[in-house]
């Protein structure tokens, strides 16, 4: 954990110091290894402190006053998000299939904030993620996971900040995070 955490923390700080305001993360500890924010802070203090730095020091002048941290919830089909995704200040993304239902692999429940298309290829090879391909075409990739869903949310955040920049809008990081999480369709019903 030591060297890994040190390198991750360095990368997060580097991103904040070099213009990044959205941190898209597709990694985490197995769901259930940590079950509270305090456990995460204690277990991986270096990474926690680096993300705190990102949240306060990442800036897009005149648009947002801090960083937005977005994580894949995990692929263990477990009724909780993995950490660090489940940390209360971060956005944890679960995966849904093209039919708007939870995928068979996605983590769900406490700690998860939002879902996005993640592919569900076990049922149908055409239910992967609609994306650009290696051959510069556009179609369904036979990929799946919350790691496919997370960039959808990060991309929406980036589009929102780009629009804010064009229009001269300004947000606090908390307000923008709230806007992102409430500008969705409720599919729980």
Image: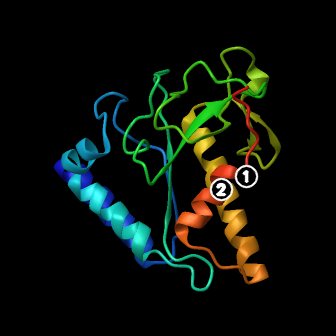
Q: Specify whether residue 11 is in view.
A: no
Q: Percent from the top left, x then y, of residue 70?
A: 52, 52
> Based on the displayed image, in which of its 4 quarters is residue 113 positioned?
top right
Q: CA distance from mark 1 to mark 2?
A: 5 Å
Element at badge 2?
helix
Q: Which mark is residue 97?
A: none
Position above or below: 13 against 76: below
Compare residues 156 and 90 and report the one nearer the observer.
90
Q: Which mark is residue 183?
A: 1
Residue drawn at the location 46% of the way across and 22% of the way down: 78
Compare residues 14 and 47 and report the one nearer the observer.
47
Residue drawn at the location 31% of the way across and 33% of the way down: 35
Q: Which mark is residue 180?
A: 2
Colouring scheme applied when the structure was drawn? rainbow
The answer to whether mark 1 and mark 2 are in CB contact below 8 A is yes
120 sits to left or right of 150:
right
Q: Percent from the top left, x then y, of residue 39?
A: 24, 42
């Amino acid at each position: 954990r030591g060297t890994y955490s040190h390198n991750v923390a360095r990368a997060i700080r580097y991103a904040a110091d070099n213009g990044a305001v959205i941190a898209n993360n597709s990694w985490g500890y197995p769901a259930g290894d940590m079950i509270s924010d305090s456990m995460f802070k204690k277990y991986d203090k270096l990474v926690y402190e680096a993300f705190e730095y990102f949240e306060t020091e990442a800036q897009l002048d005149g648009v947002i006053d801090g960083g937005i941290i977005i994580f894949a919830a995990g692929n263990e089909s477990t009724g909780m998000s993995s950490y660090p995704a489940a940390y209360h200040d971060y956005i944890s993304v679960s995966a849904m299939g093209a039919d708007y239902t939870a995928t068979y692999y996605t983590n769900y429940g406490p700690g998860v904030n939002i879902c996005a298309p993640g592919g569900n290829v076990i049922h149908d090879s055409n239910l992967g993620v609609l994306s650009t391909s290696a051959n510069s075409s556009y179609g369904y990739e036979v990929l799946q996971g919350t790691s496919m869903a997370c960039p959808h949310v990060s991309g929406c955040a980036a589009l929102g900040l780009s629009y804010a920049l064009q229009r001269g809008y300004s947000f606090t990081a908390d307000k923008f995070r709230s806007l992102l999480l409430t500008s969705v369709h409720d599919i729980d019903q």
